[in-house]
């Protein structure tokens, strides 16, 4: 698919989002749908951007033969997740030993400059650059405002997590998350939810003989049936003789890109709130 088509798909998702959300009365569904739709739009934009940049890399080398920089770029662009893509290339060489500083590499400099323009590192709301995790750890947040962000429609944390009985129990209970994870791990869990999926919270997809599909967390697996908890926290049981296939997904039920629904301060305050949730 040409990258222009990727942009067209993303534009269509964003254009129709407001109409669908306006017709949905349930605020939890609104938050969930908006979050997933926004992440989907970001994903197709990234696919388009990777194609643009890969085309650029090819033009910098002789036809039919990519140089070492473009070969590394090609490998990076095919790596999934926040640590893959052009961001992986910008952060440093993917393989091999960096050239000594005394040896100028104008082509590599040009590629990195273009990469930074085309696909910057993760951003927050309004495209504001999100500081590196090491810098975020130095920043002090506001616990009360962080709690308000947690229960806000976007990022919609409460739609999948509970804190002291408040919220929806889909993902792990976060009432004591500050006793289990440090701030650095909490930051990583928000920015890279697929990097570490808790045992018991793996996502499954079922294909049914009726032609329908089921998606969610596996809550029980007996000899005769399987129980799946959906994004609203509702558990549905399916007879095994009604299931065509069952597949465990490598992605978390928690979407990526949630920081894009928050300002930098919102993000810092949310982390501060979560880190304050500790055992009595």
Image (cartoon, rainbow, N blue to C red):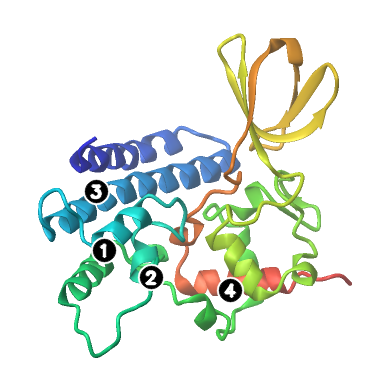
- If you read the primary sequence from the N terminus, does the residue marked by circle 1 or circle 3 appear first? 3
Q: Quadrant of the C terminus?
A: bottom right
Decide which of 215, 55 is in the foreground and name it: 55
Q: Are marks 2 and 1 in contact (CB under 8 Å)?
A: yes
Q: Are marks 3 and 2 in contact (CB under 8 Å)?
A: no
- Label 1: how many Cα within 10 Å (few below 14, some 14–19, many 20+): few
- If you read the primary sequence from the N terminus, does the residue marked by circle 4 or circle 2 appear first? 2
- Label 3: how many Cα within 10 Å (few below 14, some 14–19, many 20+): some
Residue that appears at 41% across and 43% down = 40
Q: Which residue is mark 4?
A: 269
Q: Which residue is mark 2?
A: 96
Q: Are marks 4 and 3 in contact (CB under 8 Å)?
A: no
- Quote the CA–CA distance across marks 4 and 2: 39 Å
Residue 176 quadrant: bottom right
Q: Which residue is mark 3?
A: 51
Q: Which residue is mark 1?
A: 68
- Label 2: how many Cα within 10 Å (few below 14, some 14–19, many 20+): few
Side of 230 relative to 87 (left or right):
right
Helix, strand or loop under label 1: helix
- Quote the CA–CA distance across marks 2 and 1: 10 Å
- Quote the CA–CA distance across marks 1 and 3: 18 Å
Helix, strand or loop under label 2: loop
Decide which of 37, 99 is in the foreground and name it: 99
Side of 36 relative to 60 (left or right):
right
- If you read the primary sequence from the N terminus, does the residue marked by circle 3 or circle 2 appear first? 3
- Quote the CA–CA distance across marks 4 and 3: 36 Å
Measured along the vertical axis of the image, is residue 244 above or below residue 151?
Answer: above
Helix, strand or loop under label 4: helix
């Amino acid at each position: 698919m040409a990258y222009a088509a990727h942009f067209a798909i993303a534009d269509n998702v964003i254009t129709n989002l407001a109409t669908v959300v306006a017709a949905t009365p349930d605020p939890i569904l609104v938050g969930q749908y908006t979050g997933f739709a926004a992440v989907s739009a970001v994903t197709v934009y990234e696919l388009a951007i990777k194609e643009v940049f890969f085309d650029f890399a090819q033009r910098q080398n002789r036809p039919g033969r990519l140089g070492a920089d473009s070969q590394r770029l090609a490998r990076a662009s095919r790596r999934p997740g926040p640590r893959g893509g052009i961001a992986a290339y910008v952060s440093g060489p993917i393989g091999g030993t960096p050239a000594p500083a005394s040896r100028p590499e104008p082509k590599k400099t040009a590629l990195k400059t273009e990469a930074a323009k085309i696909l910057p590192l993760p951003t927050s709301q309004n495209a504001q650059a999100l500081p590196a995790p090491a810098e975020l750890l130095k920043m002090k947040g506001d616990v009360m405002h962080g709690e308000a962000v947690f229960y806000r429609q976007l990022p919609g944390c409460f739609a999948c997590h509970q804190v002291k009985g408040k919220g929806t129990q889909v993902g792990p209970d976060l009432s004591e998350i500050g006793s289990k994870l440090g701030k650095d791990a909490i930051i990583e869990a928000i920015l890279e939810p697929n990097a570490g999926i808790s045992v018991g919270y793996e996502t499954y997809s079922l294909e049914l003989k009726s032609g329908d599909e089921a998606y969610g967390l596996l809550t029980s697996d007996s000899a005769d049936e399987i129980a799946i908890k959906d994004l609203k926290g509702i558990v549905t049981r399916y007879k095994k003789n009604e299931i065509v296939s069952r597949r465990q997904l490598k992605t978390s039920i928690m979407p990526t890109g949630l920081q894009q629904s928050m300002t930098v301060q919102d993000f810092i305050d949310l982390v501060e709130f979560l880190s304050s949730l500790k055992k009595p």
